[in-house]
Image (cartoon, grey):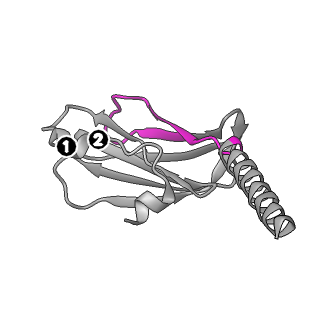
């Protein structure tokens, strides 16, 4: 009976040790967040002249060349948003060149999915004379969203 109790205690102890070591592995191997540096050039832009949008996608020091990137662009207070899928250009940079005919305040969100993470930085830019801006609540960025958070 003593051997049975002793074996039970040893088994329980080993189970605890293995469980704790697995938890350490999970927290020690947490991936770094996917970072997106969104830029607009020039800002302000001019009507009928190209504006270049770039999303530089990195994870730590690594440049990510296999992300899914879509730029969403719209004029302030406009309900119609244009979504444009963008391919990788070079060194983790995803680029779009676009011309705008109408002056005003515009917004761009880069929807970036990479390594099971989603990041959505948002920028405001102007073409010619600015127009009325959107509400502050709709002008928030959604940086660093986890894919699970985005699905909710």
Which of the numbered marks, if any, corresponds to residue 48?
A: none
Which residue does the numbered mark 1 point to in the structure image?
137
Secondary structure state at the residue bearing disc 1: helix
Residue 60 locus on image (x, y percent): 67, 35
Q: Is residue 145 above or below residue 37?
A: below
Quadrant that contains the N terminus: bottom right
Quadrant that contains the C terminus: bottom left
Q: Is residue 130 above or below residue 119?
A: above
Q: Nearer the viewer, residue 137 or 44?
A: 137
Q: Residue furthest front?
A: 1
Residue 41 locus on image (x, y percent): 45, 31
What distance separates the C-alpha of mark 1 from that of mark 2? 6 Å
Mark 1 touches mark 2? (CB < 8 Å): yes
Q: Is residue 126 left or right of residue 4?
A: left
Question: Label 2 crowding class (10 Å Cα cut-off): few <14, some 14-19, many 20+?
Answer: few
Q: Is residue 118 above or below residue 139?
A: below
Which of the numbered marks, if any, corresponds to residue 140?
A: 2
Magenta stretch contains residue 98? no
Point 51% across, 47% down: residue: 96
Q: Is residue 6 left or right of residue 83?
A: right
Q: Quadrant of residue 3?
A: bottom right
In the image, which residues are magenta?
28-55
Secondary structure state at the residue bearing disc 2: loop
Q: Is residue 12 left or right of residue 75?
A: right
Point 49% across, 53% down: residue: 146
Q: Is residue 75 left or right of residue 119?
A: left
């Amino acid at each position: 009976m003593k051997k049975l109790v002793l074996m039970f205690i040893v088994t329980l102890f080993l189970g605890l040790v293995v469980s704790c070591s697995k938890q350490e592995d999970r927290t020690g191997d947490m991936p770094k967040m996917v970072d997106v540096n969104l830029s607009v050039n020039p800002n302000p832009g001019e009507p009928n002249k190209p504006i270049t949008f770039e999303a530089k996608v990195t994870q730590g020091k690594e440049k990510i060349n296999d992300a899914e990137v879509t730029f969403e662009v719209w004029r302030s207070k406009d309900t119609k948003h244009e979504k444009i899928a963008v391919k990788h250009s070079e060194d983790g940079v995803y680029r779009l060149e676009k011309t705008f005919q109408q002056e005003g305040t515009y917004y761009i969100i880069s929807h970036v999915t990479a390594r099971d993470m989603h990041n959505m930085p948002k920028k405001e830019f102007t073409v010619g004379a600015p127009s009325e801006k959107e509400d502050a609540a709709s002008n928030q960025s959604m940086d660093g969203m986890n894919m699970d958070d985005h699905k909710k």
